[in-house]
Image: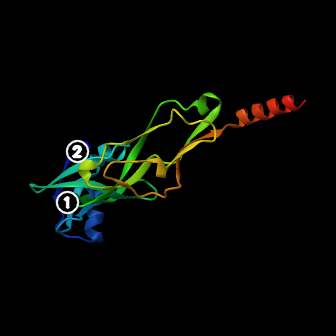
Amino acid sequence: MKTVSLSGSPRVNVGKKDAKQNRKEGKVPCVIYGGKEQVHFTLPELSFNKILFTPEVYIIELDIDGKKYQTILQDVQYHPVTDKVLHADFLEIVEGKKLTVALPVKFKGIAPGVTKGGKLMVKYRKIKVKGEIDKMPEYIELDISNLDIGQSIKVRDVELDGLTVVETPNAVIVQVKMARGAKAAASASTEEEEE
């Protein structure tokens, strides 16, 4: 997994008033949990651009007052109107402790069903997996070169060494559906055959 380094400032006061003041100054109140202690700090709002607006999952190395923490971004709260980041939760990576991470899904190959006029429907762009951080790949690659019209890849079909997939086993990740045009052509050809 790729690593991104960010540096933050510790929060002296923790409360709504202090959080509001931080946001006015362009800082986002954050917390690190999952380790020995909770750490409250702020990060500049602009530093979130490189970790939020990407499908990648990063190990985030946080430097707070000279102390370094290996973390993963766990949750982000946005303003309901402006979509500005209001608060962020980081989960500390503790050696030997399992984490749940949503890994991006990438597809390889061309589905034969699509070349026949079907439509590729992607239901999951990320899949949650549980395991130790050093066993986690940057992304999950699925081969769709065998998918015909009406076929799909489900969560239970995904196998990852040393990791457990924590999604519903019967959930469809990707499928090839018959497109409307293909349906019309298929029904017209069956009518001709019947005649």
Q: How many labels sit on residues?
A: 2
If you read the primary sequence from the N terminus, does the residue marked by circle 1 or circle 2 appear first? Answer: 2
What residue would you read off at disc 2? 4
In the rendered structure, the answer to whether residue 152 lies left or right of residue 130 reads right
Compared with 158, 30 (above or below) is below
Determine the residue positioned at 52% across, 30% down.
Answer: 110
Looking at the picture, how far across and down is residue 37, in whole percent? 17, 69
Dot 1: within a 10 Å radius of its alpha carbon, few (fewer than 14), some, or many (20 or more) residues?
A: some
Determine the residue positioned at 16% across, 57% down.
Answer: 9
What residue would you read off at disc 1? 94
- The kind of residue on which mark 1 rests is Val
The residue lying toward the viewer, choosing from 52 and 43, is 52
- The kind of residue on which mark 2 rests is Val
In the rendered structure, the answer to whether residue 40 lies left or right of residue 177 reads left
In the rendered structure, the answer to whether residue 155 lies left or right of residue 17 reads right
What secondary structure is found at the residue carrying circle 2? strand
Q: CA distance from mark 1 to mark 2?
A: 17 Å
Dot 2: within a 10 Å radius of its alpha carbon, few (fewer than 14), some, or many (20 or more) residues?
A: some
- For the question of whether residue 116 can be seen, the reply is yes
The residue lying toward the viewer, choosing from 160 and 100, is 160
Mark 1–mark 2 CB contact (< 8 Å): no
Determine the residue positioned at 31% across, 52% down.
Answer: 162
Looking at the picture, how far across and down is residue 38, in whole percent? 20, 68
How is this picture coloured? Answer: rainbow
The mark closer to the camera, 1 or 2, is: 1
The quarter of the image holding the C terminus is top right
The residue lying toward the viewer, choosing from 96 and 10, is 96
What secondary structure is found at the residue carrying circle 1? loop
